[in-house]
Image (cartoon, rainbow, N blue to C red):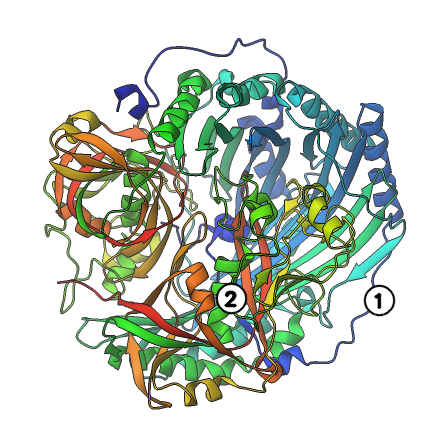
């Protein structure tokens, strides 16, 4: 229940919304990068960071880190032929984390004077000390090399904050207008959302790191209403959020594509309700990214597996690690799931994480078997036995992340992706080899239990497959899975040329809740005999 | 199940001794300071009109899990938002820097953006001075809580769990001391300050078969019995060990308040008059028009929003600076009204209601124990999880049970059950109502906000599959 003009909530709390989908098309993914070199850290920012570290050390911290961040967001919301609102937000402050006698404390303040950052550091240390009474196990951090003068910049060529508002609004309104040319499409919502983060980090191990990150997202919904008011259908989640700049918007052919998306909403009005039963599902990367996100990426977060999210986001069926690493079969031999923060233009991509670690690429699922978890410096030592056994170093994979200067960093997911198969198969190839099934494009409703076993997924478009051909559109489709059986039913995947990167701008976790943006690369894949239900209205 | 396990707000026992240390209340701006900020913006503004919103405060937290301390923090921040208007053009800029230079920069930027923005054909004239009835929501018991006291709250769960040996506790305490203010160039001004203490605990059995959850929230920390919340989660965890599977299907279900709130609160998000008039709502009458005046749920159901309800104590205005009163959405089972923005109200020639800031449902007089005693065969649900829309035409949602699901046979709890996925609508559910208990304030739903709901008993709740998750 939000007012159209409840502008601050729209502007600053949109991050609390549910995940939106989106895609980075192959063409966009292949766009050559001409990113400007990263900026060095401002000397006054470095001075404040070192001031905070000094104050934390004097207050008894054995380790401390400090982050000074500037977070800017820009939103343009429209519906049909009118603008709803334009919002620009700007937030800056310091967050200091102190480890005192094996216990964490954190404090954040918008007071960026020397006295202010020192006070935050002392408060972090005092909170840590106060919690010593409830400590049971000391925090140990995995060793990590210091990066004393590091910089990094994400893959953008046009800073969205340099683009005039009227250009953004004009583009959206033209897209809305085009979408409304489709039959029965009465309402179109669209919004552009841009984020620029200047992240400055230093720790008592000697790292001093400056990074600039730009991210862009589009929200759209086309609503077709039947003339007798007996039905309405939506088509949304049309493009992915990306770790790129305004060049991505310029390349998206938004106006031309909006007509197609509107027509798809209209076509859904005429779609046939699905008959319940078991079907072979051919899932497009625009859909499968979300299934990967929910049923693989979240369960392989090590903090979940160890119970650290038990009171909120839940635990994991991939636990305990000693019973799963190297033995638990998640899927077929050709299933390889990679964690990384290195794919250009992806949302989790970054040069250094919020522990000051340079992330690596690692296989979470290797040949269908659990091979690793997502880790931070605090978590990597929990798996030392596994890394020692395999001759691998006990190092963090660089998954520490805080969504704001005012948030404490903790384990968040990197880009988690299903890697291509050896055969050069496409989405169409998979459909052609399917006798009776449903091809699903785009992400829709999604829900999964707190240990990530039982899930239900909807979608955007459902195409009925008969004899290797698409014969029509279905509606009211959702499928229910039990995670291990589902992935083990995967019998075909696409090749390198069918790989696409999609993702979520708003993935929630933690207490206090934090929101991160994450991408998932995927190829199309086929799953055998999945349980499909009809979600249509009841009498 | 004992009654004190159900009612987390009951009992006068106090755990903490207040020592008066620390004063995070200094992190919030007073009414005078907020009025001064509005005046400052007025002195800088060259727009035809402006709105100012201010909110912020100090939030302190303690998090624990796996019987360990996890993280803890104290966060001070605030936001100043300025919306400038030039006729039908408007734009918003926010900043958290309150230097004169930063405020001036934000004012100038909002004016620049507003001039560039296309006309908003739905722009409404500003509201002049309004009368706001104050809501007393600020309590020193929260404002004065120290880091040491917060750690002691964590120990109410950690110590018994560690002592027991077969339990692991995870939980979270967050205290907020905050303020919200609104002002505009037409002289409208509103100010509200509040505190809250929110504590939730999940206790799991080390054999991996049991999990129990409990939580409580209040504006006054004195009203939250932290130890009782911890004990309730422990008791539930033990009771939920060794769950068995029963076939999914339609069952008589007793939903504890947390589960009721998660599902029923959704009704409020669909109660928008404009979406309904445009045919995009579950409250559309087939063939056109709305269902206002029609019976949509059981006649015992009443749903309203009221910032002045003593269990709510919410901000008494919406984002437009419009005073909020009590709004009756469902009265005696009939759809009574829908939310009208100022624009849509003008279009329809009715009074605007403002966007509500709470969701309340009246109840009945049955205790959960009485509901259980009167149930030959049914399911008791502690809370729900991961609710997601499946069909907006009916508010059909899917989601799962979590942290305590039990079989009722012949008037008593006989077994712990494996969790279920459901596909059901709060509208369907409230048409199948059998009994209601006393309303309670929840410790936060998935959707957030102030929610007051009773436990309820319904028939034919639709569980569609089993989950192995504990």
Q: Are marks 2 and 1 in contact (CB under 8 Å)?
A: no
Q: Is residue A70 above or below residue A252?
A: above
Say which of A278 and A183 sits in front.
A278
Residue A29 x %, y %: 65, 77
Neighbor class of circle 2 (other Cα within 10 Å; few <14, some 14-19, many 20+) is many
| Residue B273 makes an appearance in the image | yes
| Mark found first going from the N terminus, 2 or 1 | 1
- Say which of marks 2 and 1 sits in front: 2
Expressed as whole percent of the image width and height from the top left, the position of residue B85 reads 52, 56
Q: Residue at position x 48%, y 88% from top?
A: A429
Figure check: A193 above or below A386: below
Query: Relative to residue B212, is residue A487 depicted above or below?
Result: below
Badge 1 is on which residue? A37
Is circle 2 on the same chain as circle 1?
yes
Left or right of B278 in this view: A410: right
Whether residue B341 sits left or right of residue A191 in the image: it is: left
Rendered residue at 46%/72% (across/down): A490
Q: How would you rate the neighbour count of disc 1 (Cα within 10 Å): few for under 14, some for 14-19, many for 20 or more?
A: few
Q: Quadrant of the C terminus of chain A?
A: bottom left
- Against A467, is A203 above or below? above
> Which residue position holds label 2?
A331
Residue B382 percent coordinates (x, y): 31, 36
Look at the numbered disc 2 and give the secondary structure of its residue: loop
**Given the image, what chain letter belongs to the residue carrying mark 1?**
A
Between A530 and B391, the one lying in front of the other is A530
Q: Residue at x 23, y 59 (%)?
A: B394
Residue A178 visible in the picture: no
């Amino acid at each position: 229940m939000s007012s159209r003009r409840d502008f601050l909530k729209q502007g600053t709390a949109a991050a609390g919304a549910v995940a939106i989908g989106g895609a980075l098309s192959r063409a966009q993914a292949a766009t050559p990068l001409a990113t400007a070199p990263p900026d060095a850290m401002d000397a006054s920012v470095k001075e404040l960071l070192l001031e905070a570290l000094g104050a934390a050390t004097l207050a008894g911290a054995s380790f401390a880190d400090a982050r000074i961040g500037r977070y800017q967001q820009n939103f343009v919301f429209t519906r049909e032929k009118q603008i709803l609102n334009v919002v620009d937000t700007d937030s800056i402050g310091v967050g200091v984390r102190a480890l005192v006698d094996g216990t964490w404390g954190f404090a954040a303040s918008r007071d960026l004077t020397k006295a202010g950052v020192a006070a935050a550091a002392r408060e972090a240390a005092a909170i840590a000390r106060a919690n010593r009474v409830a400590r049971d196990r000391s925090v140990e951090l995995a060793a990590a090399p210091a990066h004393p003068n590091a910089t990094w910049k994400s893959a953008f060529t046009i800073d969205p904050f340099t683009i005039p508002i009227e250009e953004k609004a004009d583009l959206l309104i033209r897209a809305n207008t085009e979408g409304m040319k489709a039959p029965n499409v009465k309402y179109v919502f669209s919004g552009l959302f841009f984020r620029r983060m200047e992240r400055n980090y230093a720790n008592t191990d000697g790292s001093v790191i400056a990074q600039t990150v730009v991210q862009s997202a589009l929200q759209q919904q086309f609503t077709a209403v039947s003339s007798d008011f007996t039905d309405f259908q939506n088509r949304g989640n049309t493009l992915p959020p990306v770790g790129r700049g305004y060049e991505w918007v310029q390349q998206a052919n938004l106006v031309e594509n909006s007509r197609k998306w509107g027509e798809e909403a209209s076509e859904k009005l005429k779609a046939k309700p699905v008959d319940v039963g078991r079907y072979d599902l051919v899932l497009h990367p625009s859909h499968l990214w979300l299934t990967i996100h929910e049923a693989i990426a979240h369960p392989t977060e090590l903090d979940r597996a160890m119970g650290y999210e038990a009171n909120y986001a839940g635990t994991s069926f991939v636990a305990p690690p000693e019973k799963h690493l190297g033995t638990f079969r998640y899927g077929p031999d050709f299933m390889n799931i990679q964690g990384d923060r290195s794919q250009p233009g992806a949302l989790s991509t970054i040069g250094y994480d919020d522990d000051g670690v340079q992330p690596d690429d690692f296989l979470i699922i290797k040949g269908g078997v659990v091979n690793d978890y997502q880790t931070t410096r605090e978590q990597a030592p929990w798996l030392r036995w596994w890394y020692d056994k395999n001759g691998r170093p006990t190092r963090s994979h660089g998954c520490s992340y805080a969504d704001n200067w005012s948030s404490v960093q903790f384990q968040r997911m990197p880009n988690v992706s299903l890697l291509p198969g050896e055969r050069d198969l496409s989405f169409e190839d998979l459909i052609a080899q399917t006798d009776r099934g449903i091809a699903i494009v785009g992400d829709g409703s999604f829900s999964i239990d707190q240990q990530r076993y039982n899930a239900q997924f909807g979608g955007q478009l459902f195409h009925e497959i008969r004899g290797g051909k698409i014969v029509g559109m279905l509606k009211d489709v959702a499928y229910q899975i039990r995670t291990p059986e589902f992935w083990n039913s995967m019998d075909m995947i696409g090749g390198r040329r069918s790989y696409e990167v999609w993702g979520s701008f708003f993935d929630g976790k933690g207490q206090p809740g934090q929101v991160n943006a994450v991408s998932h690369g995927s190829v199309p894949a086929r799953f055998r005999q999945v349980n499909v239900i009809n979600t249509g209205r009841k009498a | 199940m004992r009654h004190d396990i159900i009612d987390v707000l009951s009992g006068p026992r106090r755990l903490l001794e207040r020592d008066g240390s620390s004063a995070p209340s200094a992190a919030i701006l007073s009414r005078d300071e907020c009025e001064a900020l509005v005046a400052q913006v007025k002195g800088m503004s060259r727009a035809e009109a402006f709105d100012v919103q201010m909110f912020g405060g100090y939030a302190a937290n303690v998090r624990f899990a796996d019987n360990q301390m996890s993280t803890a923090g104290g966060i001070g921040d605030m936001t100043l938002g300025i919306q400038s208007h030039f006729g039908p053009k408007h734009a918003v800029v926010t900043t958290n820097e309150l230097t004169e230079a930063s405020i001036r920069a934000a004012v100038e930027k909002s004016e620049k953006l507003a001039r560039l923005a296309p006309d908003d054909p739905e722009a409404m004239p500003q509201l002049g001075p309004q009368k706001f009835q104050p809501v007393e929501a600020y309590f020193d018991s929260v404002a004065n809580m120290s880091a040491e006291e917060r750690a002691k709250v964590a120990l109410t769960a950690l110590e018994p769990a560690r002592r027991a040996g077969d339990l692991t506790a995870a939980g979270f305490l967050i205290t907020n001391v905050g303020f919200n203010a609104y002002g505009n160039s037409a002289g409208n001004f509103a100010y509200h300050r509040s505190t809250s203490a929110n504590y939730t605990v999940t206790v799991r059995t080390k054999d991996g078969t049991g999990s129990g959850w409990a939580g409580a929230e209040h504006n006054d920390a004195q009203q939250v019995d932290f130890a009782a919340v911890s004990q309730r989660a422990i008791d539930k965890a033990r009771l939920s060990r060794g769950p068995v599977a029963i076939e999914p299907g339609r069952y008589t279900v007793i939903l504890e308040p947390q589960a009721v709130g998660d599902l029923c609160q959704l009704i409020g998000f669909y109660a928008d008059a404009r979406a309904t008039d445009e045919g995009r709502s579950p409250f559309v009458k087939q063939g056109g028009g709305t269902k206002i005046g029609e019976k949509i749920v059981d006649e015992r159901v009443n749903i309203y929003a009221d910032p002045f309800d003593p269990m709510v104590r919410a901000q008494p205005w919406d984002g437009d600076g419009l005073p909020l009163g009590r709004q009756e959405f469902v009265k005696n089972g009939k759809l009574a009204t829908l939310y009208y923005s100022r624009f849509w109200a003008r279009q329809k020639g009715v009074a605007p209601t403002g966007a509500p800031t709470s969701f309340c449902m009246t109840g009945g007089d049955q205790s959960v124990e009485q509901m259980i005693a009167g149930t030959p065969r049914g399911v008791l649900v502690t809370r729900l999880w991961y609710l997601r829309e499946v069909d907006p035409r009916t508010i059909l949602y899917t989601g799962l049970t979590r942290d305590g699901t039990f079989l009722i046979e012949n008037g008593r709890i006989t077994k712990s059950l494996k969790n279920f996925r459901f596909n059901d609508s709060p509208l369907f559910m409230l048409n199948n109502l059998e009994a209601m208990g006393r309303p309670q304030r929840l410790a936060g739903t998935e959707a957030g906000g102030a929610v007051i709901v009773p436990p309820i008993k319904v028939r034919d709740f639709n569980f569609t599959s089993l989950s192995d998750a504990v």
